[in-house]
Image (cartoon, rainbow, N blue to C red):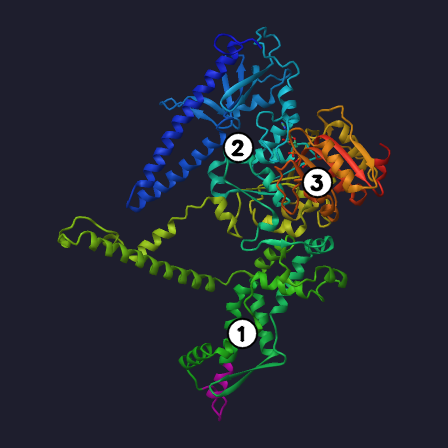
């Protein structure tokens, strides 16, 4: 390319470079100012309460802005739209305005309405555009321009025309993978844009085959909603649920690259604060635990903890024996149950009924007139008897035995240790397990259900809060004492009475100081949400939604009382036996039929040659199956080879398939991993493998949602249809299949 004497091949490139230099100068100045204002605010010492609050809000806002500015540095601006009216807008990852009073936009946020023609305009429907330009950059340097002429009457040419209009998209799809998903903000397609900007309210189901951009669209939708409903969602946070931690790691950089951080990424196994799912269930156990019927089973388990004496409990009180028999307790239990409160909340009622029963017993014994049978005690005597009973530890031991306070963990652990009698024998045998082995992902919805059934005894929570407060006050007193002591030391050469310097001690007492400490909760909404089981999220996005069990849906719906959700999935890729069959079946109990459905039909990942093979696998059992159509073909056909020496052949194939740049995955059943890893130098494997490694060894389930330049599938005869379909659709460039044993019929014919 010939360079002009300015160092640029042409004026167009030079002008864009100048514009982008101007943007970065603006960003650098903004960053400098923001950093200075944060430092300044943090440096302010003792200020009145209101000023402190304002300061904290300012620091939080500015820190968010700084994080966004840092995140988009190097990829700030990627496009430009020229209208026939003469107006031009540059499009970027964030929006920027001039600092003067006019606040003129200089860079349009991709999420703004004005930016929409960048994604939607076509020659057929130009939306007022004359030209669309993609600006390629490396860091702050403009490297290339791609122009599409949308006004066919326009004769002006820039020398950067892209005749097909898909060069930028194809370059993105063909680029080497890094082990981390990247944003698609430069090349969002019209059908994807529609979904990203769909209204916030209600449930939206997005369905599409492998590689159709479901995950990418879901993440960009989160960014869009955070932009469009900033105030609400910054307070309530957005939750993104993914199938496993490796997948969350894979997608974890997309939202920060778009300048958004107010999002909680979690698996269902991470949604019960204080519990980490470390153990795994058999397929059968996960299926049983996931059934909707488990909600009723757990309700029965709770009722069975509300026990009756067998046949009596004897309580020694005031040197007499009080006999609490099953008839009396049954009455107290029925009255308590009639209140229809969660178990731990209802306990207060049960305590009251038992104390009343025992009080009646004592009153009858000591107060009955032997002549006419009337009771001689007055109300104050009765109150005294009741108070004395409430002081008796044996009474409380009886109540604890009959209506114990329970934690979700204890309830579920106890149930799993011995589920016989609650379920058919075969199901009970499948889930029976000592909890010393740790919690599993499928246990988490059970724990959440148990937490709902049990509720929280507010009296205990209040007592705990009071204890916490007292300890905070004691701590604050300690802090104040130290400050008081240091004041005496600092000013001891002066007459203390004359000192004009006020210390903390002069203006606040310990209680007030403790209150201030409490108000200083600097956690973001997402951080607070992560620690709170009862948090109501502003919006929930569920990826691989077809995998969730009915019990997991119950948990998620509790976190979304407004039912503002985006559910993304592909029924053909359902692996979990507990997964739900149809969207209608999932959603009916929560929103009836009030949900929207959208479909993505173009596969951006898998070349046509590979897709043909993958689709044949599904067609073997579902002849009418229609896969998404691939946006490109590479001319490279996938291969299938038989071998007698699997580790040797895998090692050879890895050499053959490893891309010069990019990533390769070997997908093999778990039981082969040790043997294969021994022959693969530097391979990474395990429960949470590092996906940025050049060669990764995965089992079929782990490969869900991920993608690699090349993929080697090992022993496909051992996979179920949906697992094999997932494994075969992970490659962006090349696919090889190796087998020793039986080959699925669909692969034999190739
Ligand atoms: N508009 C686009 N521009 C550039 N790349 C895109 C676009 N849409 C999708 N892609 C790319 O296609 C690949 C597949 O996208 P994604 O993982 O979101 O698909 P998916 O539907 O979730 O697939 P699967 O169901 O197989 O997990 C990703 O690399 C993504 O970046």
Q: Is residue 362 magenta?
A: yes
Q: Is residue 635 magenta?
A: no
Q: Position of residue 584 (x, y in %)?
A: 70, 43
Q: What distance separates the C-alpha of mark 3 from that of mark 2? A: 33 Å
For marks 1 and 2, the one nearer the N-term is 2
Q: Helix or strand or loop: what does disc 2 sit on?
A: helix
The label nearer to you, 3 versus 2, is: 3
Q: Helix or strand or loop: what does disc 1 sit on?
A: helix
Identify the residue position indicated by label 1 in the image. 399
Q: Is mark 3 within 8 Å of ligand 1?
A: no
Q: Report the disc number at residue 257.
A: 2
Q: Position of residue 582 (x, y in %)?
A: 72, 43
Q: Report the disc number at residue 680.
A: 3
Would you say the residues marked 3 and 1 are in contact, meaning their CB atoms lie under 8 Å apart?
A: no
Between residue 286 and residue 347, name the one nearer to us: 286
For the question of whether residue 445 can be seen, the reply is no
Could you classify mark 3 by the number of other residues whose Cα lies within 10 Å: few (under 14), some (14-19), or many (20 or more)? some
**Quadrant of picture, ligand 1:** top right
Which residue is drawn at the image coordinates 47% and 23% (left, top)?
107
Between residue 281 and residue 621, name the one nearer to us: 281
The label nearer to you, 3 versus 1, is: 3
Q: Helix or strand or loop: what does disc 3 sit on?
A: loop
Q: What distance separates the C-alpha of mark 1 from that of mark 2? A: 56 Å
Range of magenta residues: 360-375
Could you classify mark 2 by the number of other residues whose Cα lies within 10 Å: few (under 14), some (14-19), or many (20 or more)? many
For marks 3 and 1, the one nearer the N-term is 1
Total tally of numbered discs in the picture: 3
Q: Looking at the rendering, in which quadrant would you find the C terminus?
A: top right
């Amino acid at each position: 390319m010939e360079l002009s004497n300015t160092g640029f091949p042409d004026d167009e490139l030079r002008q864009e470079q100048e514009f982008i230099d101007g943007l970065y100068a603006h960003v650098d100045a903004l960053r400098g100012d923001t950093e200075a204002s944060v430092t300044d605010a943090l440096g302010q010492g003792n200020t009145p309460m209101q000023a402190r609050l304002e300061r904290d809000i300012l620091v939080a806002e500015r820190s968010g802005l700084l994080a966004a500015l840092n995140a988009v540095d190097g990829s700030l601006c990627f496009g430009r739209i020229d209208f026939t009216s003469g107006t031009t807008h540059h499009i970027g990852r964030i929006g920027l305005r001039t600092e003067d009073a006019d606040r003129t936009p200089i860079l349009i946020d991709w999420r703004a309405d004005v930016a929409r023609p960048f994604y939607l305009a076509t020659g057929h429907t130009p939306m007022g555009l004359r030209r669309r330009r993609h600006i390629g950059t490396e860091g702050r340097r403009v490297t290339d321009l791609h122009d599409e002429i949308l006004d066919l009457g326009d004769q002006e040419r820039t020398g950067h025309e892209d005749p097909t209009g898909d060069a930028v998209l194809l370059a993105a799809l063909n680029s080497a993978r890094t082990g981390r998903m990247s944003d698609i903000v430069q090349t969002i397609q019209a059908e994807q844009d529609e979904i990203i900007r769909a209204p916030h309210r209600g449930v939206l189901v997005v369905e599409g085959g492998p590689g159709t951009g479901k995950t990418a669209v879901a993440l960009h939708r989160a960014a869009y909603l955070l932009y469009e409903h900033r105030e609400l969602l910054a307070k309530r946070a957005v939750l993104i649920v993914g199938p496993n931690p490796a997948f969350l790691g894979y997608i974890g950089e997309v939202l920060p690259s778009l300048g958004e951080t107010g999002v909680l990424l979690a698996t269902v196994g991470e949604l019960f604060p204080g519990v980490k799912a470390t153990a795994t269930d058999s397929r059968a156990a996960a299926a049983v635990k996931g059934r909707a019927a488990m909600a009723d089973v757990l309700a029965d388990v709770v009722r069975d903890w509300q026990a009756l004496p067998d046949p009596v409990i004897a309580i020694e009180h005031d040197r007499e024996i009080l006999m609490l028999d099953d008839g009396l307790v049954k009455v107290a239990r029925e009255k308590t149950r009639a209140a229809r409160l969660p178990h731990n909340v209802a306990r207060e009622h049960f305590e009251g009924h038992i104390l009343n029963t025992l009080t009646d017993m004592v009153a009858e014994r000591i107060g009955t007139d032997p002549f006419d049978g009337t009771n001689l005690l007055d109300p104050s005597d009765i109150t005294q008897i009741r108070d004395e009973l409430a002081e008796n530890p044996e009474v409380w031991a009886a109540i604890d035995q009959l209506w114990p306070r329970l934690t979700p963990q204890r309830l579920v652990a106890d149930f799993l240790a011995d589920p016989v009698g609650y379920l058919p024998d075969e199901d009970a045998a499948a889930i029976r397990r000592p909890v010393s082995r740790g919690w599993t992902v499928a246990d988490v919805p059970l724990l959440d259900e148990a937490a709902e059934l049990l509720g929280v005894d507010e009296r205990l929570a209040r007592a705990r809060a009071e204890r916490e407060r007292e300890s905070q006050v004691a701590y604050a007193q300690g802090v104040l004492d130290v400050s008081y002591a240091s004041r005496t030391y600092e000013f001891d050469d002066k007459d203390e009475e004359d000192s004009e310097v006020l210390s903390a001690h002069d203006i606040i007492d310990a209680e007030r100081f403790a209150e201030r400490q409490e108000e200083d909760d600097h956690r973001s909404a997402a951080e607070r949400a992560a620690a709170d089981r009862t948090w109501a999220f502003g919006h929930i996005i569920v990826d691989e939604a077809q995998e969730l069990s009915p019990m997991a849906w119950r948990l998620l719906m509790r976190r979304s009382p407004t039912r503002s959700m985006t559910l993304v999935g592909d029924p053909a890729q359902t692996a979990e036996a507990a997964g739900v069959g149809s969207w209608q079946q999932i959603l009916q109990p929560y929103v009836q039929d009030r949900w929207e459905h959208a479909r993505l039909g173009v596969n951006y990942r898998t070349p046509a040659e590979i897709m043909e093979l993958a689709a044949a696998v599904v067609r073997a059992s579902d002849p009418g199956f229609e896969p998404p159509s691939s946006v490109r073909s590479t001319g490279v056909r996938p291969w299938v080879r038989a071998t007698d020496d699997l580790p040797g052949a895998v090692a050879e194939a890895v050499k053959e398939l490893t891309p010069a740049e990019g990533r390769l995955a070997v997908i093999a059943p778990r039981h082969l991993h040790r043997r294969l890893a021994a022959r693969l130098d530097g391979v990474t494997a395990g429960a949470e493998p590092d996906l940025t490694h050049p060669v990764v060894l995965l089992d079929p389930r782990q490969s869900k949602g991920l993608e690699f330049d090349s993929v080697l599938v090992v022993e496909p005869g051992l996979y179920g249809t949906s697992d094999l379909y997932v494994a075969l659709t992970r490659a962006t460039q090349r696919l090889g299949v190796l087998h020793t044993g039986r080959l699925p019929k669909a692969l034999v014919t190739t």
